[in-house]
Image: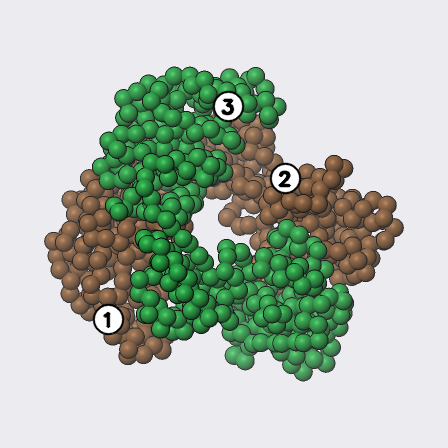
Chain colours: A green, B brown
Amino acid sequence: MKEITAELISIGNEVLAGYTVNTNATFLSQQLKNIGIAVKWVTTIADEADEIFNALEKANTRADIIVTTGGLGPTPDDITKATICKYFDTELYENPAALENLAQFISERGRSEKFLELNRGQALTPKSAQIIKNTIGTAPGLILQKNSSWFSFMPGVPREMKAMITGYFLPFLKTKYNLPKIKTEIMRTTGIPESRLYEILKDVIKAYPQFPFAFLPKQIGVDLRFRLTVIKSTDEKSWREFMDKIYAKAQKYIFTKDERDMEQVMVGLLSKKKLSLAIAESFTGGLIQDWITDVPGSSLVFKGGMVTYSNESKTKFIDVNNATINQYGAVSEATALEMVRGIQGKFKSDCAISTTGIAGPGGGSTEKPVGLCYVAVRYKEEEFVKKFNFGTERRINKMRGAMAGLEMLRRLII
Amino acid sequence: MKEITAELISIGNEVLAGYTVNTNATFLSQQLKNIGIAVKWVTTIADEADEIFNALEKANTRADIIVTTGGLGPTPDDITKATICKYFDTELYENPAALENLAQFISERGRSEKFLELNRGQALTPKSAQIIKNTIGTAPGLILQKNSSWFSFMPGVPREMKAMITGYFLPFLKTKYNLPKIKTEIMRTTGIPESRLYEILKDVIKAYPQFPFAFLPKQIGVDLRFRLTVIKSTDEKSWREFMDKIYAKAQKYIFTKDERDMEQVMVGLLSKKKLSLAIAESFTGGLIQDWITDVPGSSLVFKGGMVTYSNESKTKFIDVNNATINQYGAVSEATALEMVRGIQGKFKSDCAISTTGIAGPGGGSTEKPVGLCYVAVRYKEEEFVKKFNFGTERRINKMRGAMAGLEMLRRLII
C-alpha cells in the first residue's frame, strides 16, 4: 500500500511574527496520522498572493493531501480566495449554501443586518470548490482537487478548523483513499525516567521488533504511544500480547491506559471508591488543588485544603507542632507528616496530601538544597512519606511535587 | 534599506507526528523580529537526507538567513551533518574546539568516559563551518555561508537553541548586516475586551498612523505590542508621545508596561509596599495561589490561604455564617465578602482576595448560571466586591476569575 502523504500550509503573519504558536499543525498532524496519513511537510507563509501561489504549487509536486489554514477573511479582496481562483483556474461566486449557513449563523446568534453585510463576502467561494459548513464561525471551508491531490482550505481559528476536520474532512478522505486500519493506544507513566523505563522494557521491545512505539518524555512523566497499522487479522492479537507484556513490566508506574491526566485519574478513583480528599500545600503552593479543581465534578470528592506558606500557618491551622519545626525544620519528613495528619483531621477527609520543600531558585542551603521536597499522603489510617530531590526550576519543581503527591496517594489507595 | 529575511527550518519527526508543538519557531521569530529581521517562511520537514537537502536549496533561493533546528545527533551516521557536508561541499572532521567543549561538559557534570565515547560524534563538524559553543548540552551549533545567505544549524532542545541564539547568533548577525534600530514596548491590559479598548484608543491611533501596533488578545487580557523602526532621530520622540497618549487613555486597564505577568506585578507591588496577602478560593480552586507562588520570593508577602470548596469549609475555617449561605447561597456577594473578611482575619494579612462561583460545565441554574462568579478583595479596612458572568469553559473561567481578583486588589492598593 503506497503511503499517503500530507502537507500542512499555515497562512498567517501572526505565526511568522512569533505572536501565535502553531498548535493547528500539531492537531492536524495527530489527526491525519491516526487515519494513516503521514504529514511530511509543514509550511508557514505570509498572507501574500505570490507566497500562497508558490506554496500551493510546491505542495502539489509532493503531497497527496494539502491542508491550508488561515488567511480566509470576510472582505471581497481576500488574498487567499483570489489566489485559490488563480491557481485552480476558477472564479468566485456567491454560493447559495454558504449564504444560507451565514444567515443561519446570524439568526442563531441574534446578530444584526449590518453583521450580514460585513460578512457577506464569506459566502463568496470558488466555483469548482466543495464547501465545508462552518458550524462555529462565518468562513466556510473549501475542498478542491488538482493533479490528483486534494486541497482543503480552512479558517485559522482552532475551534472552527477542528470541527471541520473531525466532522467533515477526515470522513471525506476515508472515502477517497483506501487507508490502512490504524490502532492507537497510550500508557502514561510517572515516577521513572525514560532511560530506566527503557531498561525495564527492553526485553519485551526486543522480542517484538515489529511493533515500534514512541517514548514521549515530559517533565512529569513519560508517555508510551503505541500505534499499529493492521495489515492482516493476526497482527492485532500479537500486538495486544506485546502491550500486555509491556503493561505487566511497567504496571507500577502506569497511572492510566487512556488520555487522561493524573488529576482526572485521581478524581475518577476517589469518585469510584467514594473517598474524600483534603490537601495541604507548601512546596507546591496550590498547584495540586488547582489541578484537582480543573476536573469537572471534583467538588464531589475534594473537600478543600490550604496553602500553608508560612510556619505560622502550619502550626496555627493544621496543628503542626512548633517543636517539630524547631527541631527538624519546616522542610522535613516530620513536618510533612504532621501536615498531612493535620489537614486530614481538620477536613475529616478519607485521604490527604501534603508537600513541603524549597522550590527555588533561592532559599537553599548545603544541608537543604533547592529542589528538596517532602511529600506525605494518608489514606484513612495508612500514611506514607517520601523525600525527593528535584531540580532548580521553580515551576517544574512544583509540577513534579504535585505529580508525586497524586501518584503516591494513587498507589496507596489501589 | 532592503529588508533582511529569514527562513526557519525545523527538522524533526516529533513535530510532524504531532507529538511536539513547534515553540522554537515562535521564539526565533520574535527574536529575529526584535533585531529587524523578518521571518517569512517556517518549514518543518522529516529527518531525511533528501528532504533536508531540498529544504536548504529552496531556502537559499529566497532567504538571507536560514536557521535550522533539530536533527543533530551524536552518532557518526548523523543524517543532518552528512547532508550539510554534501550541500556545502565540505567534509566532517573532529573539531578540536568542539571536542574540548565536550570534555568540559563531561568534567563539569561528572559524566563517565563511556559518555564521552557515546557522544564523541558531536565533535565532528563540517570543515568550513564555524561552531557555536553549546553551554548546556553536547551538540555544538554550526554557521555556514552559501551564495550570500547565512545558514545556522542548532539542536532542537529549546534551552540549548535559545542560549546559542541570544548568546551568539544574534550578535553575529548584527556584525554582518546593517540592521535597523528597533524599539519594542509592551503594555498589558486586563478587564476590557479588544473592541472596547480599540474604541478608547482609536482617536490616538488615527492621529499617529505612522505607528502601527498589534493588539494581542488572550483569555485574561489584551496585550498591546509597539514596535518602532528608527529611521531618523525625531521618530523616537513622537513615538514616545504617541505611547504616552495611549497610556493616558487606557491607564486604568494597564497593569504593566513590561513583560511581567499579573502575579509578578502583584508580588512586586506587595513587596514594595511591605504588605501581606491571604487568599480564599472557591471558584478559582487554588489557581490564584498557584500563580502567586510561581513568583520567586512570593513567600515574603504571601502568608497562605485556603481552597474552601465545600460549604462546611467556608463556615468552619473562615467564619462564613451558615445563615449567609442559607439566605443568599454559597455563590453570592454576601458569601464572597464574608470569605475575604474571614481569610484576612485568620491570616492577619494586610490584603485578601476571595472567589466564589460556578465554574462549570455543570452545576448551573437559570438564576445562577455557569460562569457566575463573585470576587471580593480587601486592603486593610477597605473592601470591594464584584459580580462577573464568565463563559462555560471551566479552565478559562478559573483563569478569568483569578485575573479579576488580582486586578481588583491591584486597583484597590494603588
Pinpoint residue A248: horizontal percent, then vertical percent.
Answer: 46, 71
Residues indicated by labels 1 and 2 sit on the same polypeptide chain: yes
Pinpoint residue B168: horizontal percent, then vertical percent.
Answer: 31, 56
Residue at the right extreme of this rendering: B323
| Residue, disc 3 | A101
| Residue, disc 1 | B120
Task: State if disc 2 and disc 1 touch (CB < 8 Å).
Answer: no
- Which residue is at the front of the view, A112 or A187? A187
Chain under disc 3: A
Q: Distance between the residues labelled 3 and 1?
A: 62 Å
- Residue A184 lies left or right of residue A176; in this view the side is right
Rendering quarter of residue B72: bottom left
- Which residue is at the front of the view, A160 or B121? A160
Mark 2 or mark 1, which is nearer the start of the sequence? 1
Of helix, strand and loop, which one carries label 3?
helix
Q: Which of marks 3 and 2 is in front?
A: 3
Say which residue appears at 50% left-offset and 48% top-offset: B259
* Residue type marked 2: Gly
* Residue type marked 3: Asn
Say which residue appears at 64% left-offset and 50% top-offset: A296
| Residue, disc 2 | B391
Mark on residue A320? none
Q: Distance between the residues labelled 1 and 2?
A: 55 Å
Residue at the left extreme of this rendering: B89
- Crowding at mark 3 (Cα within 10 Å: few <14, some 14-19, many 20+): many
Chain under disc 2: B
- Which residue is at the front of the view, B120 or A104? A104
Q: Quadrant of the C terminus of chain A?
A: bottom right
